[in-house]
Amino acid sequence: MKNSKYIWVYGLAVTLLIIIIPIVIFAKPNDNVKKDDPWVHVTPTPVHTDHSVLMTGPYETAQDVTHACLQCHPDAAKEVQQTTHWTWLSKPVYVPERGGEYQLGKKNAINNFCIGITPNWPACTTCHVGYGWKDANFDFSENNQDSVDCLACHDNTGVYKKTKAGYPDDSVDLVAAAQSVGTPNRGNCGMCHFNGGGGNRVKHGDLDQSLLFPDKELDVHMGGYDFQCVTCHTTEHHDIRGKSISVSLDSLAAENQVACTDCHSETPHEDERINEHTDTVACQTCHIPEMARKESTKIYWDWSQAGHDLPESVHEYLKIKGSFTYEKNLVPEYRWYNETSYRYLAGDKIDPTKPTPMNYPKGDIHDPTAKIWPFKVHRGKQPYDTEYKYFLLPKTFGEGGYWTDFNWDQAFRLGAEANNLPYSGHYDFAPTEMYWPTTHMVAPKEDALQCVDCHSETGRLDWVALGYPGDPIEFGGREVSTQTVNQEGAK
């Protein structure tokens, strides 16, 4: 009887154990926030070396500056010459769908902006990290080390400017530029990457001059923490990490690429329901809700309208280039992407009755390596040969070029000669589209997409186009959708 008065205590203890033990055993402690310490992986900024007493000049030419740099950095030019920033061409890459090895880069790629650099070298090579690439005979060898442009990446005056064939503009003070050299900043990289395609904010929806001095609302890394491009695009022996599917044929998705998970963990969120999305959804999809948030970006270019004497506007019409459409606060388009792409190569046959993708992202709902990514899709109309059924690469710049004489037939003949592609003498214009992954202009986390932005009747994702039977909240995720397709196929 004595013990019976305490039986309720034993009962309570047993009950608590029954409840607590399973919680202790099966509960998953959420320490993702502690694990996700990106600062551990951020490369410290190198200590600046004052070059004002080392680079005294005078320098008559830009090559004289490079020659002076090489006195203390004897391997620098040779290292640069091994990179795609110098060659504008990849190493040979095996392309499964073509059954062979190919090289691609700015040197031989065709796009739906300015189309191609051959034979328009002096205009296009304004952004080459070298001096003097004015024709097909430029010397890329080690014998031409003094023509490597050190200042393009290392000038810190903020006023360095390149012009045709990559030479410095006449306004550049070479001594001041040489004395200012330091770690590359956003202005160095942006000089070319913000202005690709013929001007600021033309090509990339997430790269433009607004990133020179951004606030954290525009880009949480650059504006909130003063990241420079090289903070993420780290460099070894002048080889800068990163690649673009606009000029890439890489068959290995991770090769030389930059990823959010270089610093962040795969599951960085406190809410496990959000972490469950990371196998299927790229970080950028939720964290870059819109692009071109300060300045509009070009989304359409119609070359067929060029040559008319119409009122000109840089955002609507230029006689030398045709008509354009720009858009601000652009919502991305979403595609599966495994970080490789199908690439149109010069000479490939086309069907002019439908848009030709110049670099369609590979991947679909059945590809476990693919994720849903945000893209800027640039659409346009560009010239093609109506008999050979491939796109033409016209000479636009310089003597005989379209921008001088406004003669398409002449421009195509000169372009065909330079590119070794026959021209039938008959041409028209066909629709194209080009994909640009959105990876910059990362918004603060409180501005990231919320569930309702995708999972609602007015959500921005087209689930059916992505391969789902409908919203995964109702029909299940990728695994369920894939199983359903497999079962139906088995029947």
Image: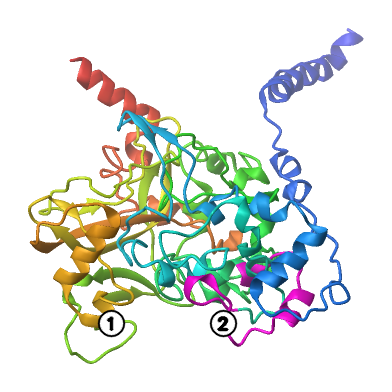
Residue 411 drawn at (x, y percent): 21, 69
Q: Is residue 181 magenta?
A: yes
Residue 467 drawn at (x, y percent): 28, 38
Quadrant into which the N terminus falls: top right
Relative to 420, is 68 above or below? below
Quadrant into which the C terminus falls: top left
- Magenta stretch in the rendered image: 161-188
The kind of residue on which mark 1 rests is: Glu
Q: Is residue 459 left or right of residue 164?
A: left
Relative to 466, is 439 above or below? below
Residue labelled with disc 1: 316
Give the numbered dot on residue 169: 2
Label 1, label 2: how far apart the Cα atoms are: 28 Å
Q: Is residue 170 left or right of residue 329?
A: right
Q: Is residue 428 magenta?
A: no
Q: Nearer the viewer, residue 339 or 47?
A: 47
Relative to 408, is 477 above or below? above
Q: Earlier in the sequence, mark 1 or mark 2?
A: 2
Splitting the image into 4 quarters, where does residue 327 fall?
Answer: bottom left
Q: Secondary structure at mark 2?
A: loop
Q: Residue at x 35, y 71 (%)?
A: 298
| Residue at the outermost top position | 1
- Mark 1–mark 2 contact, CB under 8 Å? no
Residue 177 drawn at (x, y percent): 72, 78
Q: Nearer the viewer, residue 137 or 111?
A: 137
